[in-house]
Amino acid sequence: MLATIIHGERDVRLEEVPDPVLSTGGDAIVRVVAACVCGSDLWPYRGVTPTASPRRIGHEFVGVVEEVGPDVRTIAVGDFVIAPFYDCDMTCVNCKNGVSTSCLHGGWWGAEDQLGGFADGGQGQKVRVPHADGSLVATPEYPRPELIPSLLTLSDVMGTGHHAAVSAGVTEGSTVVVVGDGAVGLCAVLASARLGASRIVAMSRHESRQALAREFGATDIVAERGDAGVAAVKELFDGIGPDCVLEAVGTKESMDQAIRSARPGGMVGYVGVPNGGAELPIRALFSSNVGVNGGVAPVRNYVEELLQDVWSGAIEPGKVFDLELPLTDIAEAYAAMDERRAIKTLVRP
Amino acid sequence: MLATIIHGERDVRLEEVPDPVLSTGGDAIVRVVAACVCGSDLWPYRGVTPTASPRRIGHEFVGVVEEVGPDVRTIAVGDFVIAPFYDCDMTCVNCKNGVSTSCLHGGWWGAEDQLGGFADGGQGQKVRVPHADGSLVATPEYPRPELIPSLLTLSDVMGTGHHAAVSAGVTEGSTVVVVGDGAVGLCAVLASARLGASRIVAMSRHESRQALAREFGATDIVAERGDAGVAAVKELFDGIGPDCVLEAVGTKESMDQAIRSARPGGMVGYVGVPNGGAELPIRALFSSNVGVNGGVAPVRNYVEELLQDVWSGAIEPGKVFDLELPLTDIAEAYAAMDERRAIKTLVRP
């Protein structure tokens, strides 16, 4: 089969690799119908995190189950399934506590040391899923084609935006500011609207992203950053600030922006993968009673809830995909996101 | 009148000072019935935070209202009142949001620049309270003498322990670890039990504090610290850790202990005044989805709720006072806490 391999900085290639083989009894082989490139894939692509040796890449995919091991109970051959950006069993105590990213037996796509051997990356034709009953959620039936992009976002970005909102305690009537206008930030806007936020400010300097933020439910846009950004946000909320700030970037600057924007007693829900040496300024948090909650999003725990609204058409997070390419154009899929020509690229094997 | 003045390291003196005078219309003069020494008073006492020039000190007191300004509505002369460790109006947006420590018009006892002029410290015979209707809560009637220590804890330590528990989301059935066995840590144990925690581990190496922790509802004691402390805590919770960790110290070591002890997806509620250069390790928080919430406790917002249980005798947080002295022995009141001969000292003018 064909799968994407990253060789180094700005060097991703689609190459012939061995087909996956069932090995653990509880695993499944999924033929990928749609996959995509993640903002976090850009760290190795840009060389910010070095690639020591060529490896599989990609961790978001939906597809059709082709084979299942003898111990698989809930997933069947022919099912259309959504996979989270990691493997998990959904039976361990952490999964049951709602934190499937800390599954005691799970792992990461593309890693070398997964249960039952090598785990495939998501940007390929097929993926072996070690814990099929845990990781995969089957849709009620084979989806209409226009639903597939939105279903794919449940693999990562929509669940991650939702996690930011849940972590910040967004609920009916909350006031919200979203820092970051990438796919996750935009999904955080949508998630906040879905949870009933009364006012949602999207911080964005890009017209197309501002437009999508508004479509997703943003009531206000703030284009400023830094001190000017904090001042603009405070002004929108009587000088006090919003209840909840959702951080979806991961830099020191964005976290700073988030913490300083929240009202006293407010909460920052963060999902941006921390990049650089940013630690949290405890004195500023202490004096204002601003809390910080979030982390690597346990999207698997949210799939059923969000799937209902995607299936019904109530939400269309798939609109974050503004470029669609065949898997053979994977290099261009990365380049378009790297150069910010695309918010998020969907690829089809 | 007599009031305590700190002159420098290990130098607190009771001195004659001018009687307070009403000045803002909304203020009241309270004759102090009981006051106490706070763990945070020990920072200037030990010289950890320097004292530039002699100043009033003390911020926890209960007493009887002697005079009120013409604009005071809810507080009357003769009322027995509880004051929080700060002044607040309870009408601004932050007070209404539950964060009266961020009151837009409030201030701190002993500070020079309070509304209407100088604000007295709590360790004296009288205190002018700038926002009497906001800051003060009157008890239903003059309390029986044995209730006074517990009422005094609503001024700070019991409300602060409660804030740690609330910030960490302690609720019916929660599993809790408390880091710190000072008065606040012990009150955090009591607050957790009151909120229905199913298991409460107190981290303490001192026999008398362990005993009081058990009396307050601790189900387990862990005497180890650092790596051994984390391992001991994890072992008590199937290797995973508790839902909530309450941090009541304020050092880098204690916060580290707290963060590392929590289960994935758990929450650290912290109220220890941050001391030293400790920042929060965002990568560790991110990977485990452990949140951090809390800060300078808005105890005024909790007085009514906690007062009911103190008044009925359901809780007796006043047991944290294991030494009682006349105000004239204020130097010994500090020394006993400094040398850890006392958990907390109550003084009576």
Image: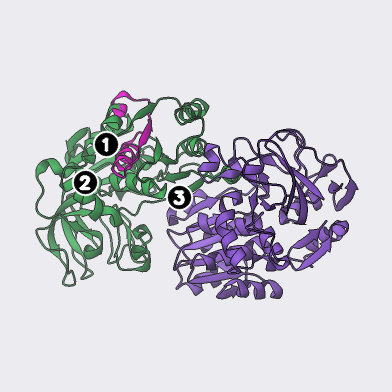
Chain colours: A purple, B green
Q: What residue type is disc 3 on?
A: Asn
**Mark nearer the viewer, 3 or 2:** 3
Q: Which mark is residue B293?
A: 3
User: Residue A139's x, y, as percent?
Assistant: 64, 56
User: Residue B327's x, y, as percent?
Assistant: 18, 41
Count residues near mark 3 (Cα–Cα under 10 Å), then give few for <14, some for 14-19, many for 20+. Answer: many
Q: What residue type is disc 1 on?
A: Lys
Mark toward the start of the polypeptide (3 vs 2): 2
Q: Chain of mark 2?
A: B
Q: Which mark is residue A16?
A: none
Instruction: Describe the element under mark 3 as helix, strand or loop.
Output: strand
Q: CA distance from mark 3 to mark 1?
A: 26 Å
Q: Mark 2 sits on what residue?
A: B152
Q: CA distance from mark 1 to mark 2?
A: 12 Å
Q: Chain of mark 3?
A: B
Instruction: Confirm whether the magenta stretch covers residue B194.
Output: yes
Instruction: Give, as a single range, the part of the protein colored magenta.
Output: B181-210
Q: Work out whether residue A131 can be spotted.
A: yes
Count residues near mark 1 (Cα–Cα under 10 Å), then give few for <14, some for 14-19, many for 20+. Answer: many
- A37 and A83: which one is in front? A83
In the rendered view, tell whether residue B217 sits above or below residue B97: above
Q: Mark 1 sits on what residue?
A: B344
User: Residue B127's x, y, as percent?
Assistant: 20, 55
